[in-house]
Image: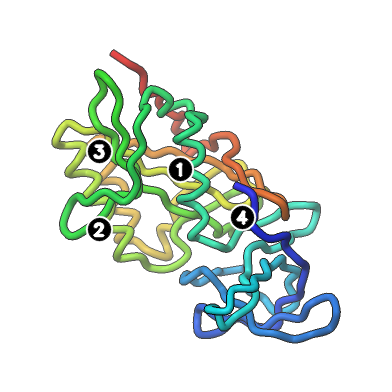
Amino acid sequence: MRFQTPLVQAVLLRRYKRFLADIRLTDGREVTAHCPNPGSMLGLADPGASIWVEPNEDPRKKLKFGWRLVDLSGGDFVCVDTGLANRIVRNALEARTIPELTAYDRVRPEQAYGTASRVDFLLSGAGLPDAYVEVKSMTLSRAPGQAEFPDSVTARGTKHLGELAEMAQSGHRAVLLYLVQRTDTQAVTVAQDIDPAYAKALQTARAAGVTVMSYRANITPQEITIGHSLPFGDDRPLVLSRK
């Protein structure tokens, strides 16, 4: 997925009201940008952070910049735009570049299921049970090389786990795919101390047959693509093949 408009560098002055960020552009202008991340953004929203923003000329939009990346030291990046995760995963599913899911040739986004919910992707393929895929964007890292989810309490995420478990128990494939939107990590875990209820729900969902996959994104100021899989605890990815 390439950014529609070339990103420009800026410095973060402050993030507030969840969706607003005051920034300083390289020409010295101070403007307010849209912050497309409702989470806590723990460790990513410190004043003085080097960031990348996307300009827009849409007259319908009040804010003319959208925050996309945090520029870490050593050439690593974090994508803070949680809305991009589904676009990245959809591109990968349609290109059939996620090894565990290559057997599925039909990708339908935002399909109704559960209780007044929509699953991110419903996959189907000849001779295969339908696969219900829920995507979660992961940006939190509190230990070198390790990414965590969630970065704040997520009742919605816990509800999704229960619904995935129901799909698995009904004989469908149920997949929770963590997209790690930072390039400095090699492993994935659950932030149990931040949301114990979510951690417990995940354990229950896995016991019910929900498969957990973790993939790291390849991120540059030009584009974001899905990269290689990351271990979730001691797990190894399970390949879903035709039977």
The residue positioned 80% from the left and 53% from the top of the image is: 74
The residue positioned 59% from the left and 73% from the top of the image is: 58
Q: Is residue 45 above or below residue 71?
A: below
Q: Earlier in the sequence, mark 1 or mark 4?
A: 1
Q: Earlier in the sequence, mark 3 or mark 1?
A: 1
Q: Which mark is drawn over residue 143?
A: 4
- Residue type, numbered disc 1: Arg
Measured Cα–Cα span from mark 3 to mark 1: 27 Å
- Name the mark nearer the viewer: 3 or 1: 1
Q: Is residue 126 above or below residue 52?
A: above
Q: Position of residue 205 (x, y in %)?
A: 26, 44
Measured Cα–Cα span from mark 2 to mark 4: 27 Å
Which residue is labeled 3 in the image? 207
Which residue is labeled 1 in the image? 90
Measured Cα–Cα span from mark 1 to mark 4: 29 Å
- Name the mark nearer the viewer: 2 or 4: 2
Q: Is residue 53 above or below residue 76?
A: below
- The secondary structure type at the circle numbered 1 is helix
